[in-house]
Image (spheres, rainbow, N blue to C red):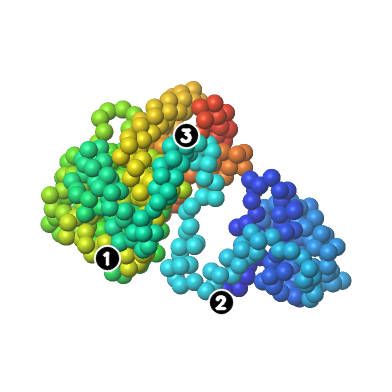
Amino acid sequence: MRTFNLSDYLLQYLDKASGTPRNRQLYRLMRQAILDRVLPADTRLPSSRDLATELAISRNTVLYAYEQLLAEGYVEARAGSGTYVADTVPDTVHLPTVATRRVAAIHETAHLSQRGHRLVAQAGAATQQWGAFVPGVPDVTQFPHKIWNTLQSKVWRKPPIAALTYGHGGGYQPLREVVAEYLKVSRSVDCEAGQVVITNGIHQSIDLCLRLLSDPGDVAWVEDPCYWGARNLLSASGVTIRPIKVDAEGICPSEADLAAVPRFIFVTPSHQYPLGMVMSLARRRSLLDYARRHGCWIIEDDYDSEFRYSGRPLASLQGMDSGERVLYMGTFSKTMFPGLRLGYLVLPQALSKPFVTGMEELHRSGQAPLQATMAEFMTQGHFNSHIRRMRLMYGARLEILQQEIDSHFEGTEVQAVGSDAGLHLALRLPARCDDKLIARLALERGVAVRPLSSYYHDASQGDSGLVLGYACVDDANIAPAFEILAKQIKAYL
Ligand SMILES: Cc1ncc(COP(=O)(O)O)c(C=O)c1O
């Protein structure tokens, strides 16, 4: 079992962006570790000077925490030999549940499998999911919740028994039908309702594909950089990831890559994530041809292409596939709201039935009342009008952000890319910029961005940049938030 490392634990949970002073946070985290006996009685604490150095905080901050613990009897000072955890733990103290869970989490990783360990260690989901400039989050305040409420109440007035028992693995049939229709018209996806499986989002769709089509050791090509969620799902399923470079035309396998045929090819053809380029027609053709000849499965993640601000909407890769090699997936997380947890997977005919069975066996399907509400929302035209309205709003926000970028960085090496679609753009920075540090400093000042290098397979070799989501930022907040970010970037220019 892994031994408890005090400074790793503190580094992980000290929250610099929190409004709670750091000395209080330190005291509470240490107290919790003592109460949970992960710091057992008689453990010698590091000297305040050493701990301050390890945590890169002031010695006074550590001294405050130690003194508080001393005053409350959690630790004791032994003359000449240091500070030790006391052997009596007050049992009347109420434990803050969050802190309890945090300590437990550190402990639990010791019991995890290798892949579980990997998953937790490389976890990508941010704790902050709202505000400037969280990538990939739509403006949920604009969701027409009154309409939704009316539709939902109607569904619940007299739900049929079939909606309240276990569903069958494909999802609520009218939703499968309306999704198939929508995809045919708006994304040129070639499908019938029977090929659509309703899932709780792209994450579940990828997971289902991996469970049903992969064996440990299979190889998957993954765009480099790519969405961290897809990478984590792949690595958790035991698939070997082969990062493939992208260029202006999308995924760009070398001769050596082509020579080692993968089982899966993960792509975001309509809007490469996170750089934003569109896969060229030539690249699409050769990828489909390669997959057909070698029997690879192409997984098309079409996560946000409803939002295009210039040019014509782009057709899906799936719609060009005559060889039944593409598994197409989309989500309502961006068009509706992420908390809805609804998405869809469109399968080649031959895989439809086994996938419905697989979904049923692995996850038991349900949520029929929710899916029925979604079907009504689409059938009555609310879905399309919501998208139209949000497209205008996001387009205007993108323009404001671009003006800000120009006014701060015109004529410099800082460049926005991938900004004609979606909910985010990438800001490329010169290599000398430490994007992780910039992101950390910006977060301390209330602005959340993701470092571009963290999307690469090997973050230490990744290009420097920042990924900025603008969809969930009020027009008026864009300039002040960008100003904060620009200041951090300019320190390097
Ligand atoms: C490229 C990409 N794919 C998938 C997802 C997640 O989709 P879902 O919420 O449907 O699981 C995201 C979320 O940001 C994304 O950026």
State the separation of the CA atoms marked 1 and 3.
Answer: 37 Å
Where does the image place residue 5, in percent across and percent down from the top left? 63, 67
Query: How much space separates mark 3 and mark 2, taking CA atoms?
Result: 48 Å
Q: Is residue 243 shown above or below 337?
A: below
Disc 2 Cβ-to-ligand 1 distance below 8 Å: no
Determine the secondary structure under disc 3: helix
Pointer 2 and pointer 1: residues touching (CB < 8 Å)?
A: no
Q: Secondary structure at mark 2?
A: loop
Which residue is nearer to you in this view: 288 or 360?
360
Residue drawn at point x = 53 percent, y = 69 percent:
109
Q: Quadrant of residue 437?
A: top right
Say which residue label 3 marks: 142
Q: Which residue is mark 2?
A: 1
On the image, the x and y values in percent for residue 376 come to: 34, 42
Residue under label 1 = 357
Give the Cα distance between marks 2 and 1: 39 Å
Which badge, 2 or 1, is on the more N-terminal residue?
A: 2
**Amino acid under disc 2:** Met
Q: Looking at the picture, how far across and down is residue 118, in whole percent?
A: 45, 65
Q: Earlier in the sequence, mark 3 or mark 2?
A: 2
Amino acid type at mark 3 = Gln
Is residue 316 among the parts visible in the rendering?
Answer: no
The residue lying at 28 percent from left, 52 percent from top is 173
